[in-house]
Structure formats: structure tokens, C-alpha cells
Image: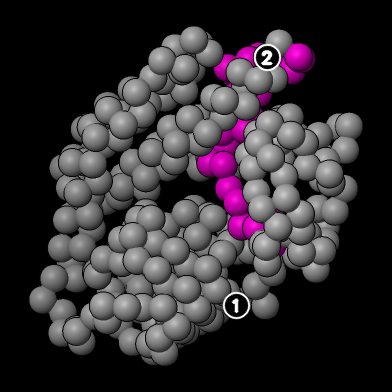
């Protein structure tokens, strides 16, 4: 599936992430905002008034967030561009569900690599199934059991991980830390390991080899990736990259964009 499917197109969205979701004043957000309420920085054209200065204005969290293209899918496909007092509350309620569906598709698409060719038919079938769900009617989306859909995905993700990491099996590797937070692990080779669900907050992985690493659900806020090699990192998302700190020498998978705040 083409990467553009998951690329955020704010011009085709009604500012859903700035309206449907809630956030609290913190180092990531400049003020409290309840769900289903427009952010104070959202204008009448559903555009952010401070988009070009979000970080210095105290809204770092906005620069990290990524909806996997769910905003335009809900706005233009599910509701066919109709945004009024009748559709708004339903749209806000269904938006998070669409984000999860698009995210699942991202992981499956990421798994379609030369080393996983033996399961490509399975991945493509599941992708087609999820794609059909993203084209459901509002009523069908509301009734969708996301937990069930996610459960059918997990075995495929496990197969992807095994096939991607097989080339790195047997590599001499130091014992992995139980706690990654804030550790200085620069310049090491962690290729083929799994940091699934781990907190890598402010972990220093500068100039490290991270090829084939499973990043599913890992928290990379302020993780130092300057000069690191993530060429074929697995299940890495744009939001995770946005939350980390890298530089011009950081090697990213082709599907991901280099954040503008990276040096």
C-alpha cells in the first residue's frame, strides 16, 4: 500500500485532532482542552494559527502527534466532506477508531519486505480487509469491535518480526538493559532486538545500529538518535520519530520523514 495513504493531509481534514481529542496543560501542551472542543489556536478554516511556531509556543505535543491519515479518511470518505452540527459529534467519536485502523494498516504495510515474501499473500489479504473497514459507514464503524480486529492482527505481526529479525540471529550482543530510561547506550549494536512497549525516554542511542529493531509501542520521547542507523527498523512510526531527537546523519526508513526540528 502506498505511503501516501498514511501521510497526514491537513487540507483534507476538519482539524479533527485539534478538536476531537482532549489534552492537559503540560510541557507538551500550552493549555487544557476537553474533548470535542476546538483548540484555541484553531481558526475558522480548521487551520492552526501557530503551526509554524508550535514548539516555542509550548505545544511540542502537537508536533509529535500523527494520525496515520485518519483525519482525511474520516472527513472525506466516511462523511464525504459533510461537517455540520449533525455529523460533528459522530465524527469526533469515530475519529480515534479510524486512527487505530490506519495504524494497524501501517504496521502491516511496514511488514511487506523482501525478507517476508513467504507471507505476503497473508499480509495483503489482511490489508484488504482493514482497508474495507476504513470505508465502512459511520454506523458500521460505530459497531466495529476493535479489540477483535487487533487480535487477528497480532499473529501476523509476530510472523513479520520473526522473519525480519532472522538475519540478525546469532549476532554477539550485550545483555539488554531491563530499564532503558535515560541510559547512555551510544555507539552500540542492538540490531534485531525488540524494545516493544519499552520506555526509551531520554535514552542515548546516538551512533547505534538499530536495524531490524522492533519498536512497536515503544516510547521514544527525547530518545537521542543522532547518527543512529534505523534503516530497516520495524514497526517504527512517524510519531515515534517526531518524539525523538536526531540529526542529519540519522538514517531512517524510506517511509518516514525527517522531522523539521532535527538539527
Q: How far across and down, in percent of the image, does residue 218 sit?
A: 39, 62
Colouring: one colour
Q: Nearer the viewer, residue 89 or 84?
A: 89
Q: Which of 108 and 179 is in front in this view?
A: 179
Q: Quadrant of residue 192?
A: bottom left
Residue at horizontal 18 percent and vertical 55 percent from the top: 163
Inspect the magenta stretch and tell me whether residue 45 lies in it: no
- The image quadrant where one finds the N terminus is top left
| Horizontal side, residue 33 vs residue 256: left or right | right
Using the rendered image of the protein, determine whether residue 182 is visible from the camera's viewpoint.
Answer: yes
| Horizontal side, residue 119 vs residue 220: left or right | left
Residue at horizontal 34 percent and vertical 41 percent from the top: 108
Using the rendered image of the protein, determine whether residue 76 is visible from the camera's viewpoint.
Answer: no
| Mark 1 surroundings within 10 Å by alpha-carbon count, few (fewer than 14), some (14 through 19), many (20 or more) | some
Residue where numbered disc 2 is placed? 87
| Mark 2 surroundings within 10 Å by alpha-carbon count, few (fewer than 14), some (14 through 19), many (20 or more) | some
Q: How many labels does the image show?
A: 2
Query: Residue 103 shows which numbered tag?
Result: none
Q: How far across and down, in percent of the image, does residue 69 sit?
A: 57, 37
Residue where numbered disc 1 is placed? 247
Residue at horizontal 88 percent and vertical 38 percent from the top: 43
Position of 51 relative to 209 (above/below): above
Q: How far across and down, in percent of the image, does residue 63 sit?
A: 67, 57
Q: What element carries label 2?
A: helix
Say whether marks 2 and 1 touch (CB < 8 Å): no
| Horizontal side, residue 209 vs residue 14: left or right | left
Residue at horizontal 19 percent and vertical 84 percent from the top: 175
Marks 2 and 1, the one that precedes in the sequence: 2
Residues drawn in magenta: 60-85
| Horizontal side, residue 58 vs residue 215: left or right | right
Determine the CA span between mark 2 and mark 1: 42 Å
Amino acid at each position: 500500500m502506498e505511503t501516501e495513504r498514511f501521510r497526514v493531509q491537513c487540507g483534507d481534514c476538519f482539524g479533527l485532532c485539534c478538536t476531537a481529542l482532549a489534552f492537559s496543560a503540560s510541557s507538551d501542551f500550552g493549555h487544557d482542552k476537553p474533548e470535542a472542543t476546538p483548540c484555541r489556536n484553531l481558526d475558522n478554516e480548521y487551520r492552526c494559527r501557530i503551526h509554524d511556531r508550535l514548539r516555542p509556543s509550548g505545544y511540542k505535543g502537537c508536533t509529535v502527534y500523527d494520525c496515520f491519515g485518519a483525519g482525511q479518511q474520516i472527513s472525506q470518505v466516511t462523511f464525504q466532506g459533510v461537517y455540520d452540527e449533525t455529523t460533528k459529534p459522530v465524527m469526533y467519536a469515530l475519529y480515534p477508531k479510524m486512527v487505530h485502523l490506519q495504524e494497524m494498516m501501517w504496521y502491516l504495510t511496514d511488514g511487506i519486505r523482501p525478507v517476508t515474501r513467504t507471507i505476503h499473500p497473508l499480509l495483503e489479504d489482511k490489508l484488504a480487509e482493514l482497508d474495507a473497514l476504513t470505508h465502512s459507514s459511520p454506523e458500521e464503524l460505530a459497531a466495529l469491535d476493535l479489540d477483535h480486529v487487533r487480535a487477528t492482527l497480532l499473529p501476523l505481526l509476530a510472523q513479520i518480526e520473526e522473519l525480519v529479525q532472522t538475519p540478525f540471529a546469532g549476532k554477539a550482543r550485550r545483555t539488554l538493559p531491563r530499564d532503558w530510561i535515560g541510559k547512555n547506550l551510544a555507539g552500540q549494536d542492538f540490531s534485531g532486538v525488540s524494545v516493544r512497549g519499552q520506555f526509551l525516554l531520554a535514552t542515548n542511542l546516538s551512533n547505534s545500529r538499530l536495524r531490524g529493531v522492533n519498536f512497536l509501542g515503544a516510547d521514544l520521547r527525547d530518545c537521542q538518535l543522532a547518527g543512529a542507523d534505523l534503516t530497516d527498523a520495524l514497526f517504527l512510526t512517524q510519531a515515534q520519530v517526531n518524539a525523538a531527537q536526531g540529526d542529519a546523519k540519522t538514517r531512517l526508513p524510506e517511509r518516514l520523514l525527517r522531522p523539521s526540528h532535527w538539527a
